[in-house]
Amino acid sequence: MTAVRRYPVLAALFIGAVFMVLPFLIVAVNAVKSPAEYSANGPLSLPDGLYLDGLKDFWERVDFGQKLVNSVLISGAVAVGAVVLSVLNAYAIGIGRIKGRPWVLAFFVLANMLPQEALVYPVYYLSKEAGLYDTRLSVIIVFVVIQSAFGTYLLSSILGQFPREIIEAAQIDGANKWQVLWRIVVPVSRPTMGVLMVLFFIWTWNEFLLPLVMLISNDNQTVSVALGVLQGQRLMDATMTNAAALLGVLPAIVFFLVFQRTLTRGIAVGAVK
Amino acid sequence: MTVLAERSGGGRATGKSRTTRPPYRPRRNSYALFLLPGALAFLAVVVLPFLMNTGVSFTDWQGVGTPKWTGLDNYRRLLEDDAFWESFRHSLAMVVAMAVIPTAIGLVLAAALFDFVAKHFGAKTAAVLRACFYLPQVLPIAVAGIVWSWILAPENGSLNELLKAVGLGSLQQDWLGDPDIALYSVMGVMVWVQIGFPLVVFMSGLQRVDPQLYEAAELDGAGWWQRFWHVTLPQIRPEIYVVLLWCTIAALKVFGAVYVLTKGGPGGATNVPSYFSFQNFFEKTQVGYGSAVATVLTVIILALALVGLRLQTRAEDAEEGVAR
């Protein structure tokens, strides 16, 4: 292809990419404008200076620090818990080759695809009965289980190809099943477990329906739920909306930059495995 | 996906080991112990609630007191409920916006980045572009909703302001408030949200395509579009199946975006089954009816998943047959 034709294609791709990123830029630009400046110049002008009071007001009004703590706590606990549960399940399925293995795996695949709508009311009802309603623990328990469905079937297929000789050798040396799991299987599957942990963390961070139903008090809500509820109430003015959007976008961008490689690799592995 | 791949892969592995050395036989029962915590947890959090939901769908229940058995009444009511049918029509629109369009665009983009940008401008440029397209995928849907409902706002919204600035003021709309347009606006937002997923999967699929195929096609005088059609598409067909299946299921489950952008409005113009069941559960407290909606949605998704998995194994088997 000649150079003359090369650049228009590249330019078109860049315009597409800019369009994808543009909403983030517009939000960032408007979050640092004062309300007066916003109403005078509209959303498209560049800011005159840095006006951070809007962000600060919003932060204090919704106690955003607490929301961040809740999100980190819930997502972190789910990431660790769901990986542990996935490894245990996958050890029995992939290495132990328990009876009815294809059916057990099919169960996990279907559980992973189940819409949360079909679980949400009973989960809400049962957690009230159990005295766990409106606690972060309830959301952690539910998502540990839901996320581990995906982890189980991904890890099972990887452990299914685990070299038998290594396990046999360990068993001849007298290692029991726990030791094989802990000393051999876990260290070898560490890369996959890392990918799963990142995916679970971000997926849980972004979850909306179940946390929305389960976490009603301000002290327990996650970032997603708090922002979604605020937006749903239609009470925010333009400056507040932008502050909310920017504070919601920032953690996601941080995760993205930190975990980009793991994420894109993980998504691809998860989809194709 | 894995189940079936796993099943055939496991079969082959044992077949091979039988000829070379005695098969390895773990004592099965003791391994089942490791499945115990998972089994109990799934029983409590997935199986029991799912069965309860299905049971409640045959009752009249407000969420308190004893559910009253009404048999198939809720399902009969569904069939005659226009709001229910409308919500499923909107689901089809979501499938177009989240599965069909992103897959089509994702294919062209992936091929362009892989077979053009990476070759002529370096892998780094391709990676940066890919990152831009993928970025919306990591955003919580609630936040994406806030960003877009502000951009699409009728007064002072960025899109309307932009149209005015370039002299197309007559095209200004109440993007999310006009019942004739709202669904298309939501679809547009979902395309933006979704596009990164097919792109990333397809690009990683292309990594395993033998570069010689492209070189041979190029030597034979195939242009870019011919290479796209005759090399790229057939080579990543498995990825295309998987992406279409996953995205279709995600489209049927859409909730957060509708909740934040439109709350199903105006006048039900953007309502989808999951939001419709949510309304029945928590706003109208018609729990039995909401459960029936959720059950229908579940049946459709599981049926799709099973058909998808079937098709995929058949495709894999066919490929293996050819290879042998």
Image: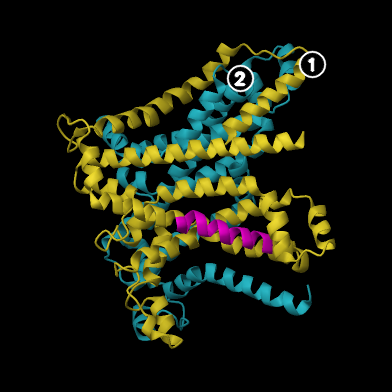
Chain colours: A cyan, B yellow
Residue interval drawn in magenta: B96-112
> Mark 2 or 1, which is nearer the eye?
1
> Among all residues in the image, which is located at the extreme bottom?
B167
Q: Which residue has dot 1 on it?
A: B19
Note whether A140 is above or below B197 in the view shown.
above
Q: Amino acid at mark 2?
A: Arg
Image mark for residue B155: none
Label 1 residue SS: helix
The quadrant of the rendering that contains the N terminus of chain A is bottom right
Horizontal side of residue B219 vs A203, given as left or right: right
Residue A108, image x, y percentages: 49, 31
Percent position of residue A156, x then y: 60, 29
Q: Position of residue B269 (x, y in %)?
A: 29, 61
Residue B235 position (above or below residue A257) = above
Residue A31 falls in which quadrant of the image? bottom left
Q: Chain of mark 2?
A: A
In the picture of the structure, the residue carrying the numbered disc 2 is A97
- Residue A209 in the image: above or below residue B264: above
As drawn, B227 above or below B175: above
Pick the front one: B93 or A234? B93
Residue at 66% over, 20% down = A180
Q: Quadrant of residue A5?
A: bottom right
* Chain designation of label 1: B
Residue B107 colored in magenta in the image: yes
Say which amino acid is labelled 1. Answer: Thr
Q: Residue at x 31, y 50 (%)?
A: B275
Of residues A28 and B57, the one drawn nearer to the viewer in this rendering? B57
Other residues around mark 2 within 10 Å, as few (<14) / some (14–19) / many (≥20): many
Res B124 visible: no
B87 relative position to A111: left or right? left
Please tell me if label 2 and label 1 are on a single chain. no
